[in-house]
Amino acid sequence: EVRTDAINVTRSPGPTKQLDPAPRTLDSLHPLIRAANDWATSGFLNRIAYAAYVDGVYTSLNEGTLRRWQRSGPEISTVAPEDIPAVIRDVFGADPALYTAAATIQQRYRIPETPAR
């Protein structure tokens, strides 16, 4: 659904999202781009996620949680870290080396969490 104030993306079944159609300038995006590339603050860089339509079903793998958005609702399962490359290969048909490289980079740059006081 496209309106002047929002673009609503609905997957049926599957997750939905809302996009803001307001025009942007490159200058207005610079702070967002810097923040997205900052390992200390970016949630995007600290998560490894993969998603695709598998046999017509939207399927996602995010931080070890595999979701298949069936018509009856999401099927959710947990994948052990050592099994993720096989899921990338067997479920998504992708090269598991992609995940392995991303995980190596993430480990190199991830900022250690500070223990709570």
Image (cartoon, rainbow, N blue to C red):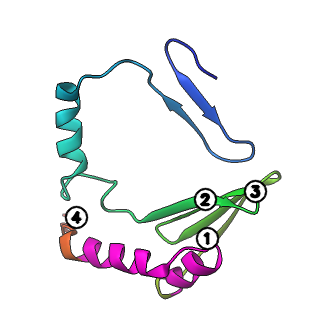
Instruction: Using the numbered discs, state the Cα–Cα distance from disc 4 to disc 2 in whole angstroms.
Output: 36 Å
For mark 3, does the 10 Å Cα neighbourhood hold few (<14), some (14 to 19), or many (20 or more) residues? few
Question: In the rendered image, which quarter contains the N terminus?
Answer: top right
Residue at the image point whose x is 58% and y is 79% from the top: 89
User: Relative to residue 73, is residue 97 drawn left or right?
Assistant: left
Amino acid type, residue under disc 4 in the picture:
Ala
Instruction: Using the numbered discs, state the Cα–Cα distance from disc 3 to disc 1 in whole angstroms.
Output: 12 Å
Which residue lies under the disc numbered 1? 92
Residue 40, given in percent of the width and then of the height, sits at 18, 57
Q: Secondary structure at mark 2?
A: strand
In-front residue for pair 18/94: 94
In-front residue for pair 18/113: 18
Instruction: Using the numbered discs, state the Cα–Cα distance from disc 3 to disc 4 in whole angstroms.
Output: 43 Å
In-front residue for pair 24/42: 24
Residue 32, given in percent of the width and then of the height, sits at 23, 37
Q: Which mark is residue 56?
A: 3
Residue 9, given in percent of the width and then of the height, sits at 60, 33
Residue at the image point whose x is 54% and y is 24% from the top: 7
Q: Secondary structure at mark 3?
A: loop
Q: Circles 2 and 3: CB distance less than 8 Å?
A: no
Q: Circles 1 and 2: CB distance less than 8 Å?
A: yes
Q: Which residues are magenta?
A: 83-107
| Mark sitting earlier along the chain (4/2) | 2
Q: Circles 4 and 1: CB distance less than 8 Å?
A: no
Which residue lies under the disc numbered 4? 116
Amino acid type, residue under disc 2 in the picture:
Ala
For mark 2, does the 10 Å Cα neighbourhood hold few (<14), some (14 to 19), or many (20 or more) residues? some
Q: Secondary structure at mark 1?
A: loop
Say which quarter of the image contains residue 12: top right
For mark 1, does the 10 Å Cα neighbourhood hold few (<14), some (14 to 19), or many (20 or more) residues? some
